[in-house]
Amino acid sequence: ASLLVMKVLEYSARRMLDEMVYVPLDFESRFVGKEIIGVFGYRFGKSLISLSLSGLTSLFGQFNLQSLSILSDVAALAWAKAAWDLSSLVPTRREAQESYEKRTKESKKMSTKPMTTKKPRS
């Protein structure tokens, strides 16, 4: 039963966070890089957590229920603080839209600008 709860929470939280990360990106970044980032981030994240837990177990021995509970509380608080701090770096929808429109205008200007060739001097 606990494995089922863990998997449901992992899937729902990861899915929601994945979507939140990609919302402010433009179309090309969102759909071209999304799968690569998702696969590598997910795999490396699981590997890093596995190595961290193995390292903690080898340093401190086996965890009893109380110490495991304290460790998970500390990890949750650290995660919440990191998420709060990083949330200020994510642009709002309006800021992302303005940035996208600005880049689109600049790229249209560059593509409509006539190309001039300089004649070499003899």
Image (cartoon, rainbow, N blue to C red):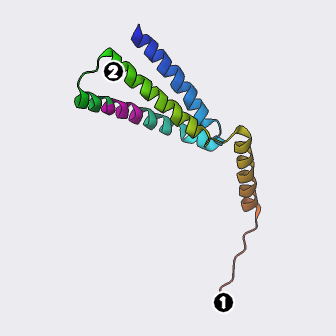
Q: Position of residue 79 (x, y in %)?
A: 48, 31
Task: Decide if residue 31 is in sight here.
Answer: no
Name the magenta segment's main secondary structure: helix
Q: Of the residues shown, which amino acid type is indicated by label 1?
A: Arg
**Total number of numbered labels?**
2
Magenta part of the chain = 43-52
16 displayed left or right of 53: right
Q: Position of residue 89 (x, y in %)?
A: 60, 43
Q: Which residue is mark 1?
A: 121
Residue that sits furthest to the bottom in the current view: 122
Residue 33 on the magenta span: no
Q: Distance from label 2 to label 1 (Cα)?
A: 80 Å
Residue 97 occupies quadrant: top right
The quadrant of the rendering that contains the N terminus is: top left
User: Callout 1 environment at 10 Å: few (<14), some (14 to 19), or many (20+)?
Assistant: few
Instruction: Report helix, strand or loop for mark 1.
Output: loop
Q: Which residue is mark 2?
A: 67
108 displayed left or right of 1: right
Q: Position of residue 39 (x, y in %)?
A: 45, 34
User: Callout 2 environment at 10 Å: few (<14), some (14 to 19), or many (20+)?
Assistant: few
Q: Between 58 and 64, which is closer to the camera in this rendering?
A: 64
Residue 22 occupies quadrant: top right
**Front tag of 2 and 1:** 2
Residue at the image position 73 percent from the left and 57 percent from the top? 106
Residue 47 on the magenta span: yes
Q: Of the residues shown, which amino acid type is indicated by label 2?
A: Ser
| Sequence-wise first label, 2 or 1 | 2
Q: Position of residue 53 (x, y in %)?
A: 31, 29
Q: Is residue 42 above or below residue 112?
A: above
